[in-house]
Amino acid sequence: MERVPILKIGGVLLVSIQIDLHDQSVLALQEDLAERISATGAHGVVIDISAVEIVDSFIGRMFATIASISRLFDADTVVVGMRPAVAITLVELGLTLGGVRTALDLERGMRILRVLGQESGRIPAGDPTGLEWS
Amino acid sequence: MTASGPEELPIVSDEDVVRVRQAVRGYAQQVRLSLVDQTKLVTATSELARNTLVYGGGGSARIEVVTDNGREGIRASFQDEGPGIPDLTLALADGWSSGKGMGLGLSGARRLVDEFDLDTEVGRGTTVTVVKWKR
């Protein structure tokens, strides 16, 4: 089974989905992420879906589940890079991704996580980028 | 309505759901559905193929190009010999789910396609057929 790699950039975990996800890889990713957040104490998770061609209800639920799991570890989740056709389809499918934060691209997603981390004091004042923090 | 190129694929594993999705995308590209319509059809396919696997206990998909008055489209059927759906109104209601997912599988898939036909019998199985026409 193909696994999705999880990269660490400072206090942020980056997941870039580059494969056509089947349900088992979705479940594996949820478990791997929980392990990594717990082990690293990351304050944020970015899920990049710019290469993802479809988001169905199962994958949509994964985003919500990852966001809930992250919250239990005091980490925020942002889904970035959604394709326009995927956005249109999600709305018609009736999937609201309730509670999952989204951003146009990786850069904006990282900025949101930095602001949230600073507001809550999880990123120390001496680390304005939030990237040195770990 | 004439049809060409029927292809039958098994749905007995997660990987099969991915394969059916990819095959439907191939057909959708062949008749040059718009990117949004391709995405809608492939997303509906994903929901329905997963239903066949999870609720129907596995089955098969049949994909073909159809034409009607010079207009082309893709027809995809998902067939299983599972327990069938006892309460269709309930199964087609938003937010209803008997298993994993967000309860949007059937009702959501129906909104994403142009034609939706559901044939089910308790104890016999379920066949869902959808069509997406090129605009």
Image: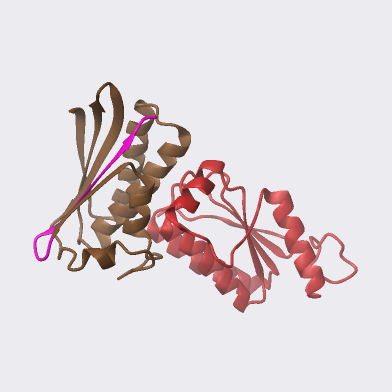
x and y percentages locating residue B50 in the rendered image: 30, 56
Which one is nearer the viewer's eye here, A11 or B38? Answer: B38
x, y percent for residue B41: 37, 42
Vertical side of A46 occupied by B3: above or below = above
- Residue drawn at x 85%, y 72% as measured from the top left: A124
Q: Is residue A32 visible?
A: no
Say whether residue B108 is left or right of residue A113: left
Residue A102 position (above or below residue B74): below
Judge whether residue A109 can be spotted in this image.
yes
| Relative image position of residue B77 (x, y in whole percent) | 22, 45
Could you tell me which residue is drawn at 66 percent across and 49 percent down? A104
Q: Residue furthest bottom?
A: A72
Q: Quadrant of residue A121?
A: bottom right
Magenta segment's dominant SS is: strand
Residue located 27% across and 55% down the image: B13
Q: Would residue B125 be counted in the magenta stretch? A: yes
The residue lying furthest to the top in this view is B70
Relative image position of residue B28 (x, y in whole percent): 36, 33
Quarter of the rendering containing residue A119: bottom right
Chain with colour red in the figure: A
The tint chain B carries is brown
Q: Which residues are magenta?
A: B121-135
Q: Check the picture and name the quadrant holding the C terminus of chain A.
A: bottom right
Which residue does the image show at 34% across and 57% down from the upper left?
B107
